[in-house]
Image (cartoon, grey):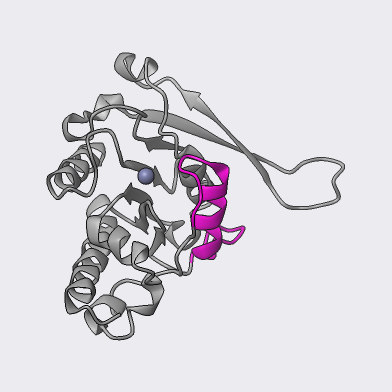
Amino acid sequence: MLETICEVLEDAYKRNWITSRDGNVSIRHHDRDHFYITPSGVRKQTLQPDQFKKIQISRWIPSGTGTADYAYNWHELPYSDISANLKPSGELPLHFGLQKEMGQHKDDVRVIVHVHPTYCVAAMHAGIDLSTITNAFPELSRYTKVAPNVGDVPPISQELADQCHKMLQLDNDGNIAFDIVGIKGHGVVAIDTSPWRAYEHIERLEHICKIVLASGNY
Ligand SMILES: [Zn+2]
């Protein structure tokens, strides 16, 4: 599916949802304790599968803490000669938090797509909470659950990761209550079981945001 992710990012670039080096995607299969993430700083319209970074997920119960909660860590695994010279996406904390447990996708695949779609970002800039527009548009709410916006947080920060996880209602088992969340002044994060399915949440929300903004009624 890494090739499909490359296709998704090429399409996102063509739609002006990212500039060359923006956007990031990760993918994990339920029976693996690693995931793949796009590298930092490469041109996404020409991304190749051998440029991805492979990330090991470590999980253990800390001794002496009196808690049964897992602790987690990650480290890079060797993957390809080309990717050895690349760094993982700066949004790794966002992806790691959503990939370390797979929640409702625990028997499947989890794909996380982060891009900067024009009308979603414009709608948030205009003061719209994306979670509030679903009610008026059944074709959106039927297939895509939209979380309340994340406010102004710095890109590639732990704060961005934490706020996205909070708004998605991510729990200890990796369950999430929503398919997509908007980050004010920045972009969106969508989650599903394939690259194109995650992409469709973005496409659907982008289409409705365009309609809402065109109507002037918000
Ligand atoms: Zn971004």
In screen coordinates, is 106 left or right of 24? right
Query: Is residue 161 highlighted in magenta?
Result: yes
At which x and y percent is residue 169? 54, 65
Query: Residue 22: in sight, yes or no?
Result: yes
Q: Which quarter of the rendering shows the N terminus?
A: top left
Residue that lies at the very extreme toward the left in this rendered image: 14
Closer to us: 22 or 62: 22
Q: Residue at x 56, y 43 (%)?
A: 158
At which x and y percent is residue 140? 26, 76
Closer to us: 71 or 180: 180
Q: Which quarter of the rendering shows the C terminus?
A: bottom left
Q: Residue at x 29, y 50 (%)?
A: 116
Q: Is residue 80 above or below residue 59?
A: above
In screen coordinates, is 78 left or right of 163? left
At which x and y percent is residue 132? 39, 78
Question: Looking at the image, in which quadrant does ligand 1 appear?
Answer: top left
Q: Residue at x 38, y 28 (%)?
A: 53
Q: Is residue 123 above or below residue 44?
A: below
Query: Is residue 129 highlighted in magenta?
Result: no
Closer to us: 21 or 174: 21
Magenta region, main secondary structure: loop
At which x and y percent is residue 77? 46, 24
Q: Which residues are magenta?
A: 152-176
Query: Residue 33: in sight, yes or no?
Result: no
In which quadrant of the rendered view does residue 182 lie?
bottom left
> How many callouts does the rendering have?
0
In which quadrant of the rendered view does residue 134 lie?
bottom left
In screen coordinates, is 86 left or right of 216? right
